Amino acid sequence: MKSKLSLLAVLLLVFPLLAGCWSRYEIENLAIIGGMGIDRIQEDGKERYLLTLNVIRPGLSGGGTEGGSRGRPIYWRITATGDTLVDAEKNINLRSPRLVFYGHMRFVVISEKIAREKLPDVIDYLARNPEVRLRILILLTKERATDALINYSELENTIAREITEMASITGSIVSKFKIWDLAQTINQLITPGLDPVMAELMTPVTAPTEPGGGPIRILRFGGGGVIKKDKLVGWLTDGETRGYLLGTGEAHQGALPVRLKNQPEPDTNINLTRSSSKLTVKAEGNKVTAKIVIHAEGDLGEYNGKEEVATNEGVFKLETKFREEVEKEVRQSFKKAQELNADIFGLGNRLHERNPKAWKKMEKDWYKILPNVKLEIKVTAHIRRTRAISEAFIPK
Amino acid sequence: MNSLEKGKISGSQFMWMMVTTVLPTAVLFIPAITIKNAGTSAWLDGLIVSTIWGLLVVTVCCTLGERFGGRSLLDYSGEILGQPLGKMLGLFYIFIITYTNAIIVREFGEFLLSAFMPETPILVFNVVLLLLAASSVRNGIEVIARMNQFIVSLMFFALIFIFCLIFGEANFHHLLPLFEGGVKPIIHGALTPMGWRGEVFLLLFMLPFLSNYREARPAAYKAVLLLGLVLGTDVIMVLAVFGKEAANFVFPVHSLAAYISVAGFLERVEAFILALWVTGVTIKVAVWYYCATLVTAQTFNLKDYKPVVLPLGIIQVVWSITIYDNIREMVDFFEKPWITFSLFFEFVVPTTLLLIAVIRKKGGRGSEK
């Protein structure tokens, strides 16, 4: 009898566990966020955060057709303001019937004003939230971040997917932008002697792309914003960003238009197929010299001259141009970095790694030393192939 | 002693038990603390400095135990210090082990709350964990040792899985510069992991359960070396992936697992950390809990240790809740008081006992029959 009673007691104790987890959220109560935009705006006479979220509309994201099956956009774009970012995040719930869930968020767009004034706050807010992944991509925009969160996508099902694919696949094909994720951004922000270049997202409005459609806003990457210490100090163009990527060994593929003949327009294109770089920094007294050794390989991508090019001499000539072009690009962006007085190539960090004693002496005055750093560039460039044809076809 | 526990374990079971006594919590808490204090040299602490310390603790404790024929500390503490002081030492170790176990239980709850289930009351996790541990303690050392053999393989699988998958993200430049700032930060960073590694001092109470107590020394050395390898790799991987930013993470290894992304589809594998954590900490708590009950039973000359399991469990639950107000207080404790606290009961007390035993010519060949 007693044992039966105790068995019953045990069974009764088990029942509450069968109801499931303690702090559970059902998926139909979650608003799954694809991306986030953070702006700073004037409201009621004071500066406040404007948080924009792209909520993936349930039931539509699988459809894949633009606009969704019921003619509604695939995203629900929702904004809220707040004195702090968490305040703004909670204020989303003034409108949203579902709980905001960041576990699937892929990117965060930060406006220029935020990047100039409030970058550490934003980084802290993102990193502190355990739902937010360290893999989320951090993007800058010169325009309002809220405009970047368009509620349709052009090729993939969601913009979040478009942006992550660009970061992981197509970004390295063009090498004109580099998107860092949250962990990498934080790492570069806290490393002394290294200033990050964060990818810039542009949001131009284009002419109608479809018959009968209006002009639409599209997303495009290019260039990057230079963050010095904790502030945005300037922007790099596409070309300068590629110089930076070549110099830091982050460039993979790309097109290098060069001039073989003496004329203003480029007539030949060299396809960069791989590149790597090695940076060494030497300090003697207060004089610092940096040496970047770049190894680049490429193919002949386009050629419209009449002279023979698919010969030993031709290839040699191409390689010379290739070398000059790579060096030129790196020098340009190095010059730009010195103008902005930001250490985007991580010279200080390299000095710190290899020669901590010298770095310790220079750390305080690093930004006074940086503009006078002499740069040596050594490029070894190889043209390996001419792709599918050898010489250009010459029409009679 | 033998009236309290009939079970016997083998040398290898003992070794794996020593590993589990340290590993599960250390793997989670150590990297952030050492990286904060030692910077880029942190990996040296996990790999070398605290391993040397662990070997030292094992040497002292094994020498002491072997001198008295592989008996438990409480069996011979009276012989060394005299009965009253010997019993006082028993009370001291009841306090120490129960207190430390309460801390371990709290760590368990804190991690689950911070990383996975922020809305569940911490009491739920702590009570469930201690109930499970109490059940294993009542079943005796053999049950714990066998369960551990299975769970150790789970833990190692989880860790190796995580380290392999994250290897592609590792940037070993983050380990440079080497030895920045000299020896001082290295020692500073090593203090907390030293205390952690010294937890193998529990072997003082476990020697009698080995079928041959002479197997304890090599097994414990192996356990400490293995721990050095695992915890060293742990710190190296965390540093290589995150660099110094890892110092600001509360649970860097959890972040490491969360950061894994293989080909865009193998993601969110931090549940592996949960497997390591829940199973491993259960055993860890069971071992400490078991030692606490045994010491209690021995100090008060009880015939059976089972009656003290429940009261000690209740004490530990309450203690684990009230011990800290917040998680930062806990981590702060590990960085400061824990160091002296743990070095004292792990090293200073056994060493003193050994010295007194040698001076008073207790134990040794004379008493071994």
Image (cartoon, rainbow, N blue to C red):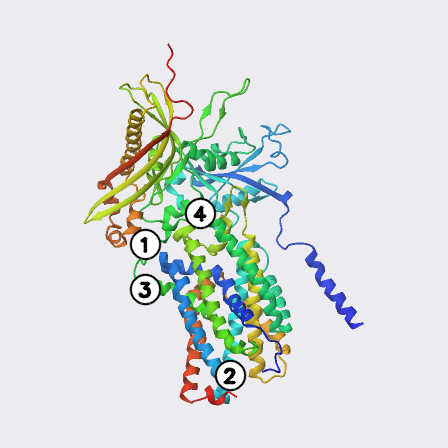
Of all chains, the one bearing label 4 is B
| Amino acid tagged 1 | Pro
Disc 1 element: loop
Residue hosting label 1: B177
Q: Quadrant of the C terminus of chain A?
A: top left
Lateral position of residue A269 relative to residue B141, left or right: left
Q: Amino acid at mark 3?
A: Lys
Real-space CA distance between mark 1 and mark 4, rounded to the nearest whole angstrom? 19 Å
* Of callouts 3 and 1, the N-terminal one: 1
Which tag, 4 or 2, sits closer to the chain's start? 2
Asked if residue A160 lies left or right of residue B191, the reply is: right
Q: Tell me: residue A148, above or below residue B135.
A: above
The mark nearer the N terminus, 2 or 1, is 2
- Residue that label 2 marks: B69
The x and y percentages for residue A143 are 42, 32
Q: Amino acid type of disc 2? A: Gly
Q: Chain of mark 3?
A: B
Q: Residue at x 34, y 35 (%)?
A: A296
Is B197 drawn above or below residue B305 in the view shown?
A: above
Neighbourhood count class around disc 2 (C-alpha, 10 Å): few under 14, some 14–19, many 20 upward:
many
Residue named by callout 3? B184
| Camera sees residue A129 | no
Q: Earlier in the sequence, mark 4 or mark 3?
A: 4
**Is the C-beta separation of discs 4 and 2 under 8 Å?**
no
Q: How many residues crowd mark 1 within 10 Å: few (<14), some (14–19), many (20+)?
A: some
Can you give x and y, in whole percent of width and height, for residue A247 in the image? 32, 38
Q: Nearer the viewer, residue A211 or A71?
A: A211
Work out how far the residue at label 4 is from the one at label 2, CA to CA, in angstroms: 51 Å
Name the front one of labels 3 and 1.
1
User: Quick check: can you spot residue B210?
Assistant: yes
Tell me which chain the residue with mark 2 is part of.
Answer: B
